Image (tube, grey):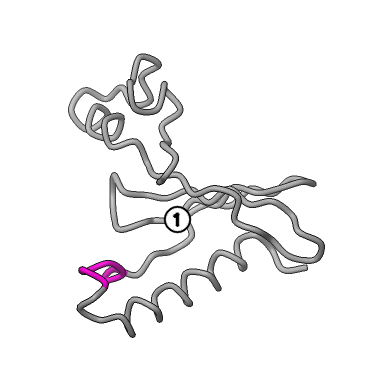
Amino acid sequence: MQSANQFIEDFLIKQAHFFQVAGPLSCGLGERAEAVLEATESLTGAAVTTSGSGPGYRQKFILERKRDSWKIKEVQSECTACFIRAQLAGNANNESCEDCGGAGWCPQG
């Protein structure tokens, strides 16, 4: 079984190819290469953090094991409010954050 890291790297390659083919229809998405920053695996799943489209826009892919592969269960975006708060005041992941509740990540969609 491939690692969660490799699964997401393969996914990002396919996503970049899609944006390349979509061209102007992609509205500028995929113009910056996305890379895996961190991956943690357990017996039942994994979490893989990517660079997203840049600082403050990282993504976290929550994966679950599916037989001999992985399935993307959820995609989360870095909490913009917490990122800005950290840049300005140095205190990220504020428990009173209305967007993420202090987790630092917000579900997409």
Magenta segment's dominant SS is: loop
On screen, residue 87 above or below 56: above
> Which residues, given as a range, are shown in magenta?
26-32
Q: Residue at x 76, y 59 (%)?
A: 66
Question: Where is mark 1, residue-wise?
Answer: 50
Q: Residue at x 73, y 65 (%)?
A: 69
Q: Is residue 61 left or right of residue 46?
A: left
Q: Nearer the viewer, residue 23 or 97?
A: 23
Q: Residue at x 60, y 50 (%)?
A: 73
On screen, residue 34 above or below 41: below
Q: Is residue 7 left or right of residue 103?
A: right
Q: Which residue is at the far top?
A: 96
Q: Position of residue 87 (x, y in %)?
A: 22, 33
- Which quarter of the figure is the N terminus placed in? bottom right
Q: Is residue 31 magenta?
A: yes
Q: Position of residue 77 (x, y in %)?
A: 39, 44
On screen, residue 90 above or below 5: above
Give the residue type that dot 1 points to.
Thr
Q: Position of residue 92 (x, y in %)?
A: 33, 26
Q: Is residue 19 magenta?
A: no
Q: Nearer the viewer, residue 106 or 8?
A: 106
